[in-house]
């Protein structure tokens, strides 16, 4: 079983910063792409940022220049550094991890989500 544990959400004022973490644990052979998504009340879940196993990154236009995704492959952990936060960044943030198990099958796991609230 692969489990994801997220941390780092909270309440912050406009212009503040937060750093989210998501650690994968369990039995697996490898971890591939790691993503952060978010879902605001009444809206669909949207992709915020992706990082490949080798460090390639992509971002949603709404967070470019403010958010940075990174990963530590030795710790099977992905991070999201969020700077200059805006009220519209308020959402539940979810990590998603893709990988392969020791039987050669691929898997996708989602974290349980962490709340980020930005006050104006």
Image: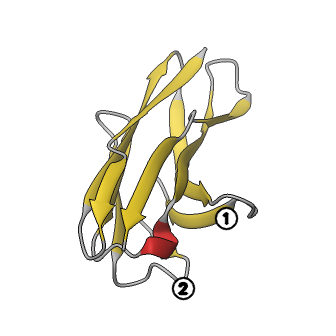
Kindly state the secondary structure of the residue where label 1 is placed: strand
Q: Is residue 22 visible?
A: yes
Residue at 63% in and 32% down: 100
Q: Which residue is mark 1?
A: 46
In this picture, residue 73 sits left or right of residue 53: left
Q: Is residue 71 visible?
A: no
Label 2: which residue? 61
* Along the viewing direction, whichever of 96 and 7 lies nearer the viewer: 7
Viewer-nearest residue: 95 or 34: 95
**Residue 106 image offset from top left, x and y in percent:** 71, 34
Residue 68 drawn at (x, y percent): 34, 68
Could you tell me which quadrant the C terminus lies in? bottom left
Name the N-terminal-most of marks 2 and 1. 1
Secondary structure of residue under mark 2: loop
What x and y, as percent, mark residue 86? 39, 76
Asked whether, in this view, residue 90 is left or right of residue 99, the answer is left
Query: Which residue occupies 44% across, 73% down?
Result: 87
Pick the front one: 19 or 14? 14
Which class describes the residues within 10 Å of circle 2: few (<14), some (14-19), or many (20+)? few
Residue 82 picture location, percent across and down: 32, 66
Which quadrant of the view contains residue 39? bottom right
């Amino acid at each position: 079983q692969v489990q994801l544990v997220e941390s780092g959400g909270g309440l912050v004022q406009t212009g503040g910063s937060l750093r989210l973490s998501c650690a994968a644990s369990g039995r697996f052979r490898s971890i591939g792409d790691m993503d952060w998504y978010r879902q605001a009340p009444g809206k669909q879940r949207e992709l915020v940022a992706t990082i490949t196993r080798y460090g390639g990154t992509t971002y949603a236009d709404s967070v470019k220049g403010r958010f940075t995704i990174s990963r530590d492959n030795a710790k099977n952990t992905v991070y999201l550094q969020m700077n200059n936060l805006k009220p519209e960044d308020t959402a539940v943030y979810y990590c998603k991890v893709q990988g392969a198990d020791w039987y050669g099958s691929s898997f996708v796991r989602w974290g349980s989500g962490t709340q980020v609230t930005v006050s104006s």
